[in-house]
Amino acid sequence: MRELGELFGWLLIGAYAGTLLNFILKVINKRYGKVIKKNPSADKVMKFLMMLFVKNHKIFGIATLLLLLSHFAIQYSRFGLNITGLIAATLMATQVGLGIYASVTKQPRKGIWFVMHRSIALFIFVGIAIHLLFPHLFG
């Protein structure tokens, strides 16, 4: 069970990274798109990455939620409540909730929800780092 909990944790980080690549690839494309288009092989790779991570951003978000629930259930049943994990999980659940809200209500990519959605992504990164580096920080 221990290995399965750890596996779901690492897969969770991978799914979260996949959601972050949506933003990162858009920034790269915006800043360096003209340069990338001049190189056919780089353009082909960029189009593939954009298709994979931008088009499937929602799928990576859903995978993040499912892996979060699985990881939490296994680790909680084995070790009890971990505060650093709970903080990271709460941030992730909030992030997924904002994404679902925007998707269901067809929100434009602007406004307070969008600022929060992007800001929370940074806090999640910090929360995961603290959870991995100092898992028993709060007891």
Image: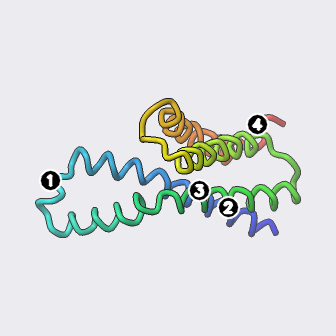
| Nearer to the camera, 108 or 51 | 108
Q: Name the residue under label 1.
A: 35
Instruction: Give the Cα distance between marks 1 and 3.
Output: 31 Å
User: Where is the C terminus found, in terms of image quarters?
Assistant: top right
**Image coords of residue 101 (percent x, y):** 59, 45
Instruction: Give the Cα distance between marks 1 and 2.
Output: 37 Å
Circle 1/circle 2 CB separation < 8 Å: no
Circle 1/circle 3 CB separation < 8 Å: no
Q: Name the residue under label 4.
A: 137
**Image coords of residue 17 (percent x, y):** 51, 55
Instruction: Give the Cα distance between marks 3 and 4.
Output: 20 Å
Residue at 73% x, 46% y is: 85
Instruction: Give the Cα distance between marks 4 and 1.
Output: 46 Å
| Number of numbered markers | 4
Q: Tell me: 80 left or right of 4.
A: right
Amino acid beneath label 1: Val
Amino acid beneath label 3: Ile
Q: Name the residue under label 2.
A: 67
Amino acid beneath label 2: Leu
Sequence-first disc among 1 and 3: 3
Circle 4/circle 1 CB separation < 8 Å: no
Residue at 81% x, 45% y is: 82
Res. 13 mark: 3
Disc 4: CA contacts within 10 A as few (<14), some (14-19) or many (>=20): few
